[in-house]
Amino acid sequence: MTLALGFALSGCVVAVGNNSPAPPPPAATNSKLAGMQYLYGSAEADAISRQAWNALVTYAADRVRHPPRDSVVLEPGATLDAPRFVSCTGKSPAAVFDVDETVLLNLGFEQDDLTGRADRAFPGRWSAWEQSDGHAVLPTPGAAAAIADLRTMGVTVIFNTNRDDSAGTARAIDAAGLGPAVHGDTLFVRIDTNTGDNKDARRWRIAERYCVIAMGGDQLGDFSDLFNGPASASERRARADGPRVAALWGRGWFVFPNPVYGKALKGSADDIFPADRRWHPTGEQ
Ligand SMILES: [Mg+2]
């Protein structure tokens, strides 16, 4: 409290014209905090989330008015360069969502993670979180209204998560105001198939029954297992940028921001910045 008050007061002094430099912002206490500031604290992440949900509802409404021939689930054997999609013939519309950091913000777990208690290391800590009462989650901004809108327009909302505990997951989804989620019907968890974190087998099970008109996720594996193979940061980016795949972002495949964890967080500075796109002031190396 004292620290916060100090910054607030010095901010006031600067605002009325004192020429002394403003104090630096408090440094991130560890590398996780910057991503958490963005995802759980910032207005910008709130806006991106709402942007994705708004676009998804608009897209889904159009698909309901003009039913597509094909779903947005890649068929077995398809590739990212030559995608083919599961047929929609004779099926009612559904939208498929990842859970964590797609429809739910795991505030309780992530705040606890900052404490760095070594004796509660992942995955034991995560298992305990999956079984918690759901009071420490929130829906992602825009999720509750969007999911309600989808259901109102006749789109079945289905959750496909890599959590293991179906009862705890349904409880958390309910607690966030996003339910119902019924295991085996509108909720699929990792242990439903023997494919580990790969979700295609569950997507195909869903797409057999429903015309999946939209999918949402914070990791590319929420759209296709073809993104999950070992790859450098630049290789992953190239997969997302391929001409057939690039056309799907915002048109059936909707991505939510997650700078806190996941496969996006990889690559050295040399991997991230191309050699021919580096710059320093003249005279510096
Ligand atoms: Mg997720």
Image: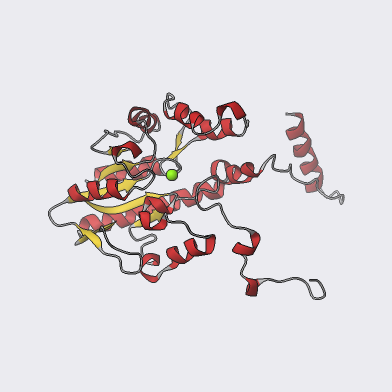
Residue at the top extreme of this rendering: 133
Point out the quarter of the image occupied by ligand 1.
Answer: top left
Looking at the rendering, which quadrant does residue 241 occupy?
bottom left
Q: Is residue 206 visible?
A: yes
Tell me which residue sits at (48%, 61%) in the image.
Answer: 236
Find residue 2 and report its horizontal and vertical position in percent: 76, 29
Find residue 216 and report its horizontal and vertical position in percent: 37, 50
User: Is residue 141 shown above or below 19?
Assistant: above
Find residue 96 and report its horizontal and vertical position in percent: 31, 47
Numbered-mark total: 0
User: Is residue 104 shown above or below 112?
Assistant: below
208, 194: nearer the viewer: 194
* Colour mapping used in the image: secondary structure
Tell me which residue sits at (62%, 66%) in the image.
Answer: 273
Tell me which residue sits at (33%, 45%) in the image.
Answer: 195
Tell me which residue sits at (60%, 63%) in the image.
Answer: 271
Task: Describe residue 42's horizontal placement relative to residue 248 as left or right.
Answer: right
Looking at the rendering, which quadrant does residue 67 occupy?
bottom left
